[in-house]
Image (tube, rainbow, N blue to C red):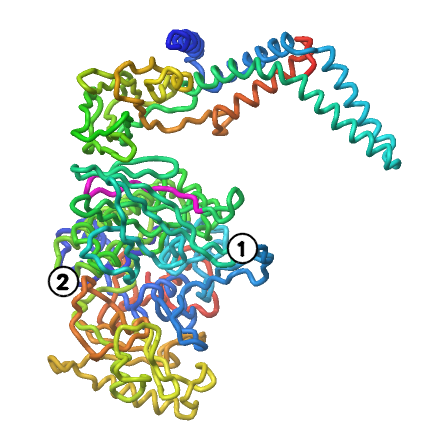
Amino acid sequence: MIVLGIDGMDPVFLERHWNSLPNLNRLRQRGDFRRLATTIPPQSPVAWSTVSTGLDPGGHGIFDFIHRDPATRLPISSMAEVTAASTTLHIGPYLLPLSSGRVESLRAGRTFWQLLGDHGVPATVIRMPANFPPAECEQESLAGMGTPDLNGSFGTFTFFTNDPAERRTQISGGRIVRLHIESGSTVLHIHGPPNTLRADHATRDIAVQVHADPTAAAARFDMPEQQFVLRQGEWSDWQRADFRLIAGLKSVSGIFRIYLQQVHPYLRIYVSPVNVDPNDPALPLSTPKRFSRTLAAELGPFYTQGIAEETSAFRAGILSKPEFLVQSRKVLADSLRMFRYQLNRFSSGLLFYYFSSIDQNSHMLWGKYEADLLDIYRKVDGAVGEAMAQPNTELLILSDHGFAPFDRAVHLNTWLMQQGYLTLNNPSHMGDAEEFAHVNWEKTQAYALGLNGIYLNLYGRENGGVVSLADKQDLLDEISQKLLDFRDPVNGEHVIDKIYFADKVYRGRNLKNAPDIIVGFRRGYRASWQTALGAVPAAAIEDNTQAWIGDHCMAADEVPGVLLSNRKFQVGNPEMTDIAATILNEFGVPGTREMLGRMVF
Amino acid sequence: MDLFHTVVNAVLRAFVALFSWAPPSVGLTIISASAGMGMLWVFRRTSDQARIRRVKKKVYAHLLEMRVYSDEPALTWRAQRSLLKVNVQYLLLTLPPCLFLAVPVAVLLIHVEAFYGRAPLELARPALVTAAFDSGPEGPAPELTIPPQFDISAPPVRVLSEHQVSWRVLPRAPFSGELTFAINGRKVTKRVVAGRGPAFVPGRRVRSVWASFWYPDEPHISAPGIEWIEVSYPGAVISVFGWQIPWLAWFVIVSMLSALLLKKRFGVTL
């Protein structure tokens, strides 16, 4: 059985373009096609965790990309937790660990491939989202969305320039470094990971010398062990670098790519996030551990960062749309190469393969650049055709959600403030300062964090919470009603379609990190980026002027996913929870007691 | 110097050609074993074997002394001191043969590098050709003429701070021949090899006669103004019983092993 997970594949887009997507069209004609009800909220880590475990978010405990630590109300990753060594020995500048640190997945429940493994069914699971660190088992698996770069972030690029027009230094997802050029030469200091073996945790860097030709649009890059020349507008191959933690004793290996955007009159160089080297992984990337090495030996270096498309640089205006498209096609080419390798070696059991490209490109192209997006769909359609060519194989294709335009950005914290539920120390402090920098918690009853969540400042749960347990439900009802009444001042339309309460919409009881209110935005509306990280800008709602123009973090009914197969479905309205049950049933493997879902065939 | 290198190179080429039917590890194993025997022969001729034998006996004696009198701290301490002293004597006795061996072994290793240490350029994979000059280059980059099996895939990059120019070349088909540079009105060539499999892959070509000791694969450059030309070849490894190892490691293992195994036959005490 082959299962293809195609993030963000939209049913309406498919229906509009069947003629351009011959393999998907053939599949639905010979087999079946349905809309697949997505999770609440319709976010990738949430939905794919449901696919993996057959549990709803209340069971697997993932409700967003991020959740908050009730003690600090600061955002933390919902998918994995990294804990440093608890016992260390301080010698001079060094901090030697006497116990090991840990990287733990926050997703609860057993995955379908673990259960298959328990019953001797071989499975290969490539890039399943929210599977970092990979679920422990003997099956071959490679971590997907949620895998950090070598710095521990979801992807931090570096942009080097001497362009005086570029005055920024920090932007979301990246940093901008000013270059000093002498005789056409300069040095790029590329950040590696913080050195956890030093007391000051100083970042380890590697230096790349750059020599720009005085007149030609090309430059030479001198790495510690090799040199290469790039023309303006070219991406380098993968470059490998060792970041030394203790000279001669301990180093970590990373890989990155360099893009020479411009040489004259100003040098503009983009360096991708430093990915964990699959050949010598500093973080757990695969099961078994040697699997990522095997893949690197067979295929060469590949993107290991969970979300590899450079949307942050596009949003920040560092990369133009054509440059973003080139880079995202490189990610897809990388993925297709690995897909073909896996397809060629697949003989029995299960192969799950995940494609991120439609999702990431839809975010940047939705509704405005139909032809560019269709080109990505076509490439994925080609991969579907290759999977269909496998003899005697059941094929199941699913997406976790569809897409919708993201026209208006809603600052939920500002709305909460306007309604009297959130108070600033000084009203003049409204702005883009993140992490609730100016919030007066003694006078705040509710706050928003993440892309769909509102939390009460609950006594006994939040540090210094003010809302008593007795008042909780009344307050939730009051806020919910006001949210449903919330209208866009520009067009008078409702902003929010649905409000969900975790204890009502989920069957699972693993609700420790669940928001108290899950906001189901109307099509076209979404929580702002500022809301996601706890900022309180001036207006409650404004036009989305960023390059990120498509999204799915809305009411679940607005953005269903798709389900296709070369077999007929017996279920009229399949859901995300049905996928694990269906896969296990195909191999005659029983699910766990907690698993929800039905067999779709 | 060029003549000397040419002779050494020709001998090695003939030797490697004899074993061209076999994997590279076979030829290298024979070179390494021969080198081990050669080193034994030089060692016997240039060392005081009688004194070495005496000193080694003393070493064994002091080791035995330490073992027998392990419960006598004073004796053990004295034995350790004596052992240190005879070890120094041993090292001094092996110094002359080592000095005699240093130059020929260095010459051998430097030459063998071109056969086993570098791989030909991979087809369709860009590589750099870099030339270093005495000064500049302030004006346009020198002209590089490439064979039809190659493309130049980027403008030449002049690195003023290092007086270098780098060209990015792309091999399209297997080739072994020359790149030609027009420098100050004179033509300078550099051998280049692209394709698969083991081959003689020459390293840097230099102008300085003294530097050509370290870069012996091509005659030194006679044209003024240019210091060296280099092609960035990928490194090669030797496959031995499925293990990929650097050729130098295999050379050391085999030459040492052959020397140890044959020392009695050669009547040598090491």
Answer whether residue B63 is visible to the viewer in this image: yes
- Residue drawn at 74 percent across, 10 percent down: B50
Q: Which secondary structure lies at badge 2? A: loop
Residue ID at (48%, 27%) = B246
Left or right: residue B87 compared with residue A404:
right
Residue under the image location 42 percent in, 54 percent down:
A203
Residue A238 forms part of the magenta stretch: yes
Left or right: where A25 falls relative to A392: left
Which chain is disc 2 placed on?
A
Residue A293 higher or lower than B151, as above or below: below
Magenta segment: A231-243
Q: Chain of mark 1?
A: A
Reply above or below: A65 against A308: below
> Foreground residue, A119 or B109?
B109
- The residue tagged with tag 1: helix, strand or loop? loop
Q: Note whether residue A567 is visible.
A: no
What's under tag 2, amino acid-wise? Answer: Gly
Instruction: State the CA–CA distance, disc 1 to disc 2.
Output: 54 Å
Q: Is residue A128 magenta?
A: no
Question: In front here: B132 or A532?
Answer: B132
Crowding at dot 1, Cα within 10 Å, few <14 / some 14-19 / many 20+, comes out as few
Per the rendering, the mark at residue A367 is 2
Where's residue A483, x and y in %? 25, 84
* Residue position for label 1: A93
